[in-house]
Amino acid sequence: MSLLIKGGRVINPATNTDEVLDILIDTESKTITKVEKDITEENARVIDATDKYVFPGFIDMHVHFRDPGQTHKGDINTESHAAARGGYTTVCAMPNTAPVVDNKEQFCYVRDKAKAVGLCNVLQVGSITKGMQGKELSDIYGMASEGMICISEDGKSVMDSGLLREAMKIAKEKNLSVLSHCEDINLVQGGVMNAGKKSEELGINGITNAVENIIEARDIMLAEETGARLHLCHCSTKESVDLIREGKEKGIVVSGEVCPHHFALTEDDIPSKDDANFKMNPPLRSKEDVEALKKGLKDGILEVISTDHAPHSAEEKAGDFNQAPFGIVGLETAASLTYSELVLGGYLSPMQMAEKMSYNPAKILGIDKGDISVGKIADITIFDPDREYEVKAEELAGKSKNTPFIGWILTGQVTTTLMGGKITYELHEKEEAKGLKKVIQNITDKFKK
């Protein structure tokens, strides 16, 4: 059987293609067989992509699927549905589960369950230390033998620099990416939001930029010494852009990601200390930091947009800033926020959006994805840049709904996701009708004004 994507604006950074073309997919081989104008194919199922972008399938280098052990928050099935709805065909799942993914048995559990679910490629990340206790290295060799391609201690930093250096040496030897959560735990001192006027106003302990930057600087230096491929997770400060730029200029293999909440929100958007949907780690920063992050993305210093998708139950997030856990969900809103805030905001072109959300992550991870050329696996995201919709908790596919973006009107939405030529998500007619109704209402409201 064949699938034929007709009339979409194909945006493929791998070939610098930005043109209205058709794409023919052989669903048996899961590959793209033609990319050209006016393809005709008998008996092919046709997907009309007129006036839509056709991107390489999105790749998220930073998610938490909570499986095993924390499945009241989310699991591989529910969060794979969220990923597909957000246009993601590949995700990197962090190891801070219960138990921690620090051995090949736990690694294989996630890998095999994700394959059985079959909605997105889940690349399980192995922890750097056993139990994420920071005392002894995990079975990095064993997990690598089963196909693991990256390690991380996300949720915390490995504070023992000597131990981290040994892990980086192994990463270099086995060609693994090191995904680094940068937080000097000794400097946090009870902080739960950005240190600044807002934290003073709310009477909450703050987290300074130095908490992040000190570990970023250390990890970049260790990457230089070991030759490891370093990727800095969820960069949130203006200094992080400078540190990565300086590292690149020295020839160090270092990259960085930004999450949509860190370029779409500032500390000033936090309504009160009682709304923990605005509590994440690193915290929402200052306007100056946000502007630096946007410029860093625009200039290519920051190469990746990831979500740090972190589901928590409603009961857990019901507490105030001091009590509730850090983290928000992000898979289902990331593309729309990127388009609304960065593309329409003049920071990125659609081509650069595809680079940050697909092509660059694939290069950093060393996987053969992020490319929709002939012969490649058909991981594809179709995105309607003109569609407006309201973010509603009840429409989110993931198990948890902890996001500060509920009620936001966003422009641009994923309409179809294909993984290996299989449709894993399609925008339903009911959702389309709701979106159209909202657009009509917005136009009416503007006219009345």
Image (tube, rainbow, N blue to C red):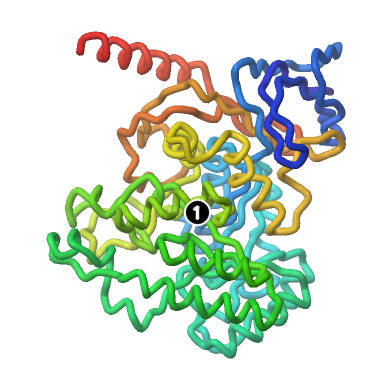
Closer to us: 318 or 59: 59
Does residue 197 appear to the left or right of 391 in the view shown?
left
Q: Is residue 266 left or right of residue 142?
A: left
Total labels drawn: 1
Residue at the image point whose x is 63% and y is 77% from the top: 223
Residues 75 and 311: in front is 311
Q: Residue 54 placed where, x, y %?
A: 66, 28
In-front residue for pair 45/448:
448
Q: Is residue 275 above or below residue 160?
A: above
Q: Is 181 in front, or is 66? A: 181
Extreme residue toward the front, this view? 249
Q: Residue at x 38, y 63 (%)?
A: 281
| Location of mark 1 (residue) | 296
Q: Secondary structure at mark 1?
A: helix
- Which quarter of the image is occupied by the C terminus? top left
Q: Where does the image place residue 147, in percent across and percent down from the top left?
A: 76, 64
In terms of image quadrants, where is residue 316? Answer: bottom left
User: Callout 1, which amino acid?
Assistant: Gly
> Is residue 397 in sight in this rendering?
no
Q: Position of residue 148 (x, y in %)?
A: 72, 65
Q: Is residue 246 above or below residue 361?
A: below
Q: Is residue 341 visible?
A: yes
Residue 180, above or below 269? below
In which quadrant will I find the N terminus?
top right
Q: Is residue 35 left or right of residue 432?
A: right
Q: Position of residue 146 (x, y in %)?
A: 77, 67
Residue located at (84% from left, 28% from top): 26
Mark 1 closeness class: few <14, some 14–19, many ≥20 residues within 10 Å: many
